[in-house]
Image (cartoon, grey):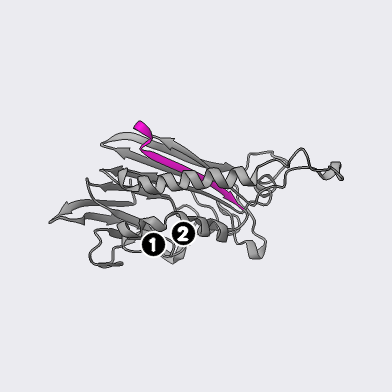
Amino acid sequence: METGIVAVEKIGGRSTVTRCFSKYPLKFIIPRKVGSSTTDAVWIYSLTYGGGIVSGDSISCGFTIGDDCTAVLTTQASTKGIQSCRIKMLRTSLGVGKNWEQCPIGCHSRSSDIGRHATGEKWDFALYKSSNHVFLDDQPLFLDTQLVLLEQGSISSVAERMKDYQVIAMLVLLGPRLKHVQNRVQEDVKRMMSEKLRAPSAGIKRHRSSDHRLTKPTFIASCSPFGPKGIGVVVRIAATTTESVYSFLRHQLAGMEMLLGVSPYC
């Protein structure tokens, strides 16, 4: 059974929450005003009791966003996972012109995600699974599952396999209202990665041939269109710091301020 359900429909010409249900360990807060009153956008904050997800918790949410409605699902801060988390599942049914974005999750020792890096809890977990499903007019449009698993008998830990990368993230942009954001992200990612992964010129003197290798980038991103006529774009990111990911998101999503009332990650 789902632990959270939210429906947004057009009432009196404005996006309005018509259904909101949540139960432990999840809670929704829907403020009356975020940003300019002239902006038609519903903001939904998801919270967990105690500020995190603990062993045995399983969160499954469903969101239905009507035609010509705008809704923002976010959190007050990154979600903490304490000890062993189970599954985080989000199912979204959309009308026209929507954005879907997964927020960062950070977990403590013996948990299902990255951990507190300052205390040495680097990828200190055995299992993390997160599913995000987006449906358009009840038809599956984007189905994604991230699974990070420490296999039994493995000779290397998750931290060893992740090397220096501290963050993995996914951004999904969907709908005609976000076409300008999609185009900008794809152009910027193509330019950034071509610069980061460009091989040194063959004309440069190789005075240290043993060290003549590409430097491992601290930030990696990829873009892929999906859906009919490329209606959506998914961006996948791996980085060595959370700050670099937030900086990327603030820059790329700045153009959404006119739709949401405030800039995401401001």
Per the image, label 2 sits on a secondary structure element best described as: helix
Distance, label 1 to label 2, CA atoms, is 8 Å
| Mark drawn on residue 250 | 2
- Which residue corresponds to mark 1? 263
Q: Which residues are magenta?
A: 228-239
Q: Is residue 100 above or below residue 227?
A: below
Label 1: how many Cα within 10 Å (few below 14, some 14–19, many 20+)? some
Judge left or right: residue 98 versus residue 209: left
Which image quarter is the N terminus in? top left
Q: Position of residue 112 (x, y in %)?
A: 55, 51
Q: Is residue 257 above or below residue 177?
A: below
Q: Is residue 153 above or below residue 84?
A: above
State the residue in front, 125 or 223.
223
Which residue corresponds to the image point at 73% horizontal and 43% vertical from the top-left?
214
Q: Are marks 1 and 2 in contact (CB under 8 Å)?
A: yes
Q: Is residue 90 magenta?
A: no
Label 2: how many Cα within 10 Å (few below 14, some 14–19, many 20+)? some
Q: Position of residue 238 (x, y in %)?
A: 58, 48
Which residue corresponds to the image point at 85% horizontal and 42% vertical from the top-left?
210
Which residue corresponds to the image point at 50% horizontal and 42% vertical from the top-left?
146
Kind of residue at badge 1: Ser
Judge left or right: residue 59 versus residue 150: left
Q: Position of residue 103 (x, y in %)?
A: 45, 55
**Dot placed on the residue nearer the N-terminal end, 1 or 2:** 2
Kind of residue at badge 2: Arg
Per the image, label 1 sits on a secondary structure element best described as: loop
| Mark drawn on residue 193 | none
